[in-house]
Image: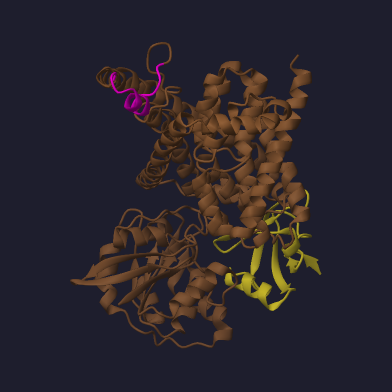
């Protein structure tokens, strides 16, 4: 038996799905989080039943790709559970009536039911059940309330006998609303004042700037605290002694020693430069990058669940249009700052090929992921704000200028923004922690193997002289055009695999500030990491990804060359 | 008649017509935007940015071009 979970976007469908199946799916307070569908199982009276989380849809007359998928999936379902946002009964009933016409056994979960009380809405559930002739269960998926009853009543599902003229649908809904819902008007609440202020430019732009500043400060504070009080003490006081013992033990086996511990710098282990699997290979992903990834995701989860992001999309829409995107494209960009992989996945929320191509290319080139940023801060931080300012300023300028160009040369259409703006919700701590934990697990699963593989490959390539060889043949480009030592080629090769490792390989080259800036910019721009590349391959297809890659490499070389020229003049 | 873009921020209006193809009208309808409903314009952005409107307990952002196809009568 197949049960379908259907509902408007952003009604908490994914949370209900998590509750019913125990399968973790990411949910956020903005429409379109689940564009892919998820599948899970639940037990109903001992029988294992398949449950499918269908992408959110406003209507069964599809107007976009996600909705088409939803309608297609409806055909093979045996039972439909419609999840409704009780605070917005009217619009949700539009889908209910369309579902009723499909003549499938149905049950309704009146989700966010607890919230109706706060905003002065009363819903007569019994009456609603009577009128539309299917079971209705009030739920609050976030706290788990009502979920048990929902499962218990699945065997009461039935095909509704409610009859109506399809053309008169909204009238029918009006009649139902009049009978089951009463709204007590409450005074303007703080949340409502904020709701108005955050979408008006005069107040909204200062709020946006304040939020960005707060986000940046919070990420730095959380990340640095974790490093200073947890990760550095762990590696220095606990891990180093073990590694030194292992090193003494392995002193007779040079090859193995170099592979596991790496080379000593100043007669001890240097976690950034030794390049052993157990030293650099573990320290970079866990000690240097993980704290910031954690900090980023916890702050992002807070923003996502509060419902602020769709407002950001509205505020930045005009600027995004200059690059052929619309405001919603801010979501893949923001996610990309954490890790480009989820950013690349989020490109799905954009509709046309043109938008997807531009968003993928701009993100790959000019949105540095947290791993890269953490290492750049380590590399350029000692030189003060100047180096970092130039690197990030250049990336921002490239993002915008390249966007202006791509908008003109890429064929296709850029549709306008049309999104629902959800009410503000106070984020639910458990939800935030769960989401952050899922993303961290995913990061560790993705990043650690790639870093270890990277360290291994770097060791092999150096041992066999391959990096030195590539350095020799690419020397003209590196020496003359970019003004970098040819050894930097090794870092760029590593950058295909992991950007954070690549930055680590730049440290021992003793470069000048100018060289460090050029190398950082080129490294950020020329290619996303392999993991992102794989996701983009699926999202864009081979041909578009090749085009995008050509743009990445060319713009990295051009900007690197230009920076080298400009800085050669100004840094003297 | 006025379009949604002409309606001043903070004012209410009734949607009199939605000019556009079948697909456009359907897209609006699915979100609950249709002839006869009362809306309040909440904000507009600078340089022909999107317009946000509220109706019932819904809040929706529509691009400037789309807003130009939604005819409203101020009340």
**Residue A73 drawn at (x, y percent):** 45, 75
Q: Residue at x 41, y 35 (%)?
A: A456
Q: Is residue B35 visible?
A: no
Q: List the single residue furthest toward the right.
A: B1
Quadrant where the N terminus of chain A lies?
bottom left
**Residue A419 drawn at (x, y percent):** 60, 59
Magenta segment? A251-264
Depth order, front residue of A94/A413: A413
Question: Image quadrant of residue A270?
Answer: top left
Depth order, front residue of A119/A338: A338
Chain identifier, colour yellow? B
Question: Image quadrant of residue A76?
Answer: bottom left
Q: Is residue A143 magenta?
A: no
Say which colour chain A has.
Answer: brown
Decide if residue A48 is on the left or right side of residue A542: left
Q: Is residue A559 above or below residue A97?
A: above
């Amino acid at each position: 038996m197949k049960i379908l979970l259907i509902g408007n976007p952003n009604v908490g469908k994914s949370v209900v799905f998590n509750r019913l199946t125990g399968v973790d799916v990411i949910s956020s307070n903005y429409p379109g989080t689940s564009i892919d569908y998820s599948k899970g199982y639940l037990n109903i009276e001992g029988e294992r039943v398949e449950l499918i989380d269908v992408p959110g849809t406003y209507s069964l007359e599809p107007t976009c790709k996600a909705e088409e998928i939803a309608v297609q999936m409806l055909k093979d379902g045996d039972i439909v559970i419609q999840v409704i946002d009780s605070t917005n009964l009217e619009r949700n009933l539009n889908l209910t009536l369309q579902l009723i016409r499909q003549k499938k056994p149905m049950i309704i979960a009146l989700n966010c039911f607890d919230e109706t009380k706060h905003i002065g809405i009363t819903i007569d559930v019994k009456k609603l059940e009577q009128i539309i002739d299917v079971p209705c269960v009030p739920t609050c998926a976030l706290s788990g309330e009502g979920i048990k009853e929902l499962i218990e009543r699945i065997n009461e599902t039935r095909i509704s006998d409610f009859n109506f003229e399809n053309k008169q649908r909204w009238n029918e809904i009006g009649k139902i609303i009049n009978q089951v819902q009463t709204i007590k008007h409450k005074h303007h609440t703080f949340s409502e004042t904020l709701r108005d202020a955050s979408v008006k430019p005069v107040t909204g732009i200062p709020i946006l700037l304040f939020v960005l500043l707060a986000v940046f400060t919070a990420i730095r504070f959380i990340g640095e605290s974790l490093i200073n009080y947890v990760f550095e003490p762990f590696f220095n006081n606990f891990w180093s002694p073990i590694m030194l013992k292992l090193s003494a033990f392995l002193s007779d086996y040079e090859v193995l020693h170099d592979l596991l511990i790496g080379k000593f710098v100043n007669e001890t282990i240097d976690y950034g430069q030794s390049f052993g699997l157990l030293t650099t290979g573990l320290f970079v992903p866990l000690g240097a990058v993980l704290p910031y990834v954690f900090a980023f995701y916890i702050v992002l989860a807070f923003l996502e669940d509060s419902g602020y992001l769709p407002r950001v999309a509205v505020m930045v829409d005009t600027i995004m249009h200059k690059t052929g995107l619309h405001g919603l494209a801010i979501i893949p960009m923001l996610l990309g700052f954490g890790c480009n992989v989820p950013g690349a996945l989020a490109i799905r929320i954009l509709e046309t090929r043109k938008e997807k191509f531009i968003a993928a290319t701009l993100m790959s080139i000019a949105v540095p992921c947290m791993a890269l940023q953490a290492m750049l801060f380590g590399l350029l931080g000692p030189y003060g704000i100047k180096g970092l300012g130039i690197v990030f300023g250049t990336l921002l300028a490239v993002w915008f200028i390249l966007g202006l160009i791509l908008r003109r040369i890429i064929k296709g259409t850029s549709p306008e923004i049309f999104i629902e703006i959800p009410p503000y919700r106070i984020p639910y701590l458990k939800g935030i922690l769960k989401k952050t934990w899922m993303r961290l697990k995913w990061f560790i699963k993705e990043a650690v193997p790639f870093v270890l593989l990277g360290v291994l490959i770097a060791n092999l390539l150096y041992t066999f002289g391959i990096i030195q060889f590539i350095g020799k043949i690419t020397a003209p480009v590196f020496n003359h055009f970019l003004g970098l030592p040819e050894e930097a080629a090794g870092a760029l090769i590593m950058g295909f695999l992991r950007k954070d490792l690549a930055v680590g390989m730049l440290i021992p080259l003793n470069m000048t500030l100018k060289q460090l800036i050029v190398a950082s910019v080129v490294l950020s721009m020329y290619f996303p990491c392999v993991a992102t590349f794989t996701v983009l391959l699926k999202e864009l297809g081979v041909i578009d990804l090749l085009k995008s890659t050509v743009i990445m490499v060319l713009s990295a070389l051009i900007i690197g060359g230009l920076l080298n020229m400009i800085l050669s003049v100004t840094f003297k | 008649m006025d379009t949604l873009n002409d309606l001043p921020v903070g004012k209410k209006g009734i949607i009199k017509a939605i000019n556009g193809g079948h697909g456009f009208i359907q897209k609006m309808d699915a979100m609950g935007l249709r002839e006869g409903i009362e809306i309040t314009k909440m904000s507009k952005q600078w340089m022909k940015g999107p317009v946000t409107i509220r109706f019932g307990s819904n809040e929706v952002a529509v691009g400037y071009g789309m807003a130009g196809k939604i005819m409203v009568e101020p009340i």
